[in-house]
Image (cartoon, rainbow, N blue to C red):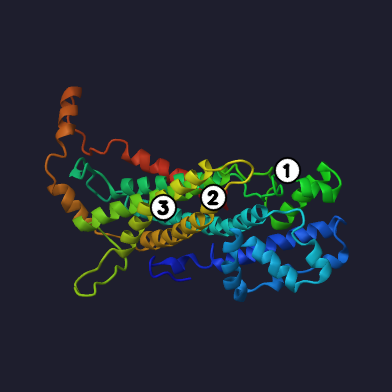
Amino acid sequence: MNDLFWPGDHRAGAVMSDTALLAALAAVENAWLTVLVEAGIAPAAAAADLTALVSEADLEDIATAAERDGNPVTALVGLLRECATADTATWLHRGLTSQDVLDTALMLCLRDGLTALTEALDEQVNALIGLTEQHRDTPMLTHTLAQPALPGTAARKFANWLAGVLDAVDALKALPALTVSSGGAAGTFAATTELAGSPAAALALARNWADVLGLAQAFPWHTNRALITRTGDALVGCCDAWGHIANDVAAGVRTGELAEGSGGGSSTMPHKNNPVLTVLLRRAALTTSQLGATLHAASAASVDERADGGWHVEWSTLRTLVRRSLVAASQATDLLLGLRVDTARAATNQQEAQGIYAEQQTMAALADRPPAARYLGTTDLLVDAALQRARHHLKEAQ
């Protein structure tokens, strides 16, 4: 995909695209029909590969028809019934409601997005380990409230970035399992129970459906949207971490200490080497928090057994949040892999800073001892702790 309004959108590939959602919707319907046939509820003649009955060419018709019913599932089911045999047409979608199908399809799309995001984060962890180790002794002035503060090292800055990325990793790891959404029209499994013959058999069908799709089983969550909001929060947390890195890089570019490996040009100033990845990462961090907030607002708008608008807000919001997070993930990886550190400039900037040892002199006088040769506190220990945490994560991820 490409998006002139969001440079870099192509980095997200097909994840959460219209094509991906259509394929997921068909896969969800196909899996349910398979389960009904395997359970002996639908006749063997009803078995079919529903995914083969739809293609990208059907997107426009389904998208247009979706306005009539407020979601694309009814239009898809209508198309499948037109193309299928009589037995298949009779039995497909029986026991499901549109929200079951769409929520479950979103989980399939989301799974692809989270997998790609996890891989990118691991690559960033490796890159930051390398930067931290390489620049353990590189002087780099610290700043607080945009002013020179105390002596520091580049390793400490990079270790701080590393901790932020690892926090984002932990938030993703803490997410609950992606589940099917089942329950039928009012979340009671009424139709499925009627088909299966008992409540226990109805729940067994839902469990088998989840197994076929490679998702977890869950009780109906039509108006309990914690899975969506928690996922959104984790994605926003990733973009927060990358935003922090981008802000520090932007500041380092101003002082001449940091530079992108391959910056962007200017349409009119040939001397420019713009930190474009940095700028685009800041863009993501500035916009994704609102998308996460929208998911919470949609969740809070849930009502009765099926929401009348709140649910409908989620789909495009989640798609945009996932895609923008994947774009930012790819850009952050490129930024870190190509980041350049001007060690001489960093050392000079720290050496020329005024007043950065005043605090040390005060503390040494209070302690009645000569000032230490290095005023770095526990910097080395903090760096070691971040590196140890990172290596432990990578070992677990293997």
Compare marks 3 and 1 and give the one earlier in the sequence. Answer: 1
Image marks 3 and 1: residues in contact by CB distance under 8 Å = no
The residue nearer to you, when weighing 170 against 181, is: 181
Instruction: Establish if 53 lies above or below 395.
Output: below
Q: Position of residue 152 (x, y in %)?
A: 25, 44
Q: Can residue 391 be seen in this view?
A: no
The residue nearer to you, when weighing 7 against 146, is: 7
Q: Counting other residues with Cα less than 10 Å from the Cα at mark 3, is it few (<14), some (14-19), or many (20 or more)?
A: many
Image depth: mark 3 or mark 1 in front = 1
Compare marks 2 and 1 and give the one earlier in the sequence. Answer: 1
The residue nearer to you, when weighing 377 against 305, is: 305
Q: Mark 2 points at which residue?
A: 309
The kind of residue tagged 3 is: Thr
Q: What element carries label 1?
A: loop
Compare marks 2 and 3 and give the one earlier in the sequence. Answer: 3
Q: Where is residue 171 in the image (x, y as percent from the top left)?
A: 50, 44
- Please tell me the numbered disc located at residue 188: 1
Q: Quadrant of residue 88?
A: bottom right
The kind of residue tagged 2 is: Gly
Instruction: Establish if 262 lies above or below 237.
Output: below
Image marks 2 and 1: residues in contact by CB distance under 8 Å = no
Q: Is mark 3 on a helix, strand or loop?
A: helix
Q: Is residue 31 visible?
A: yes
> Disc 2 versus disc 3: distance between alpha carbons?
21 Å
Q: For the image shown, how many numbered marks are present on the structure?
A: 3
- Please tell me the numbered disc located at residue 288: 3
Q: Is mark 2 on a helix, strand or loop?
A: loop
Instruction: Establish if 44 lies above or below 366.
Output: below
Image depth: mark 2 or mark 3 in front = 2
The kind of residue tagged 1 is: Thr
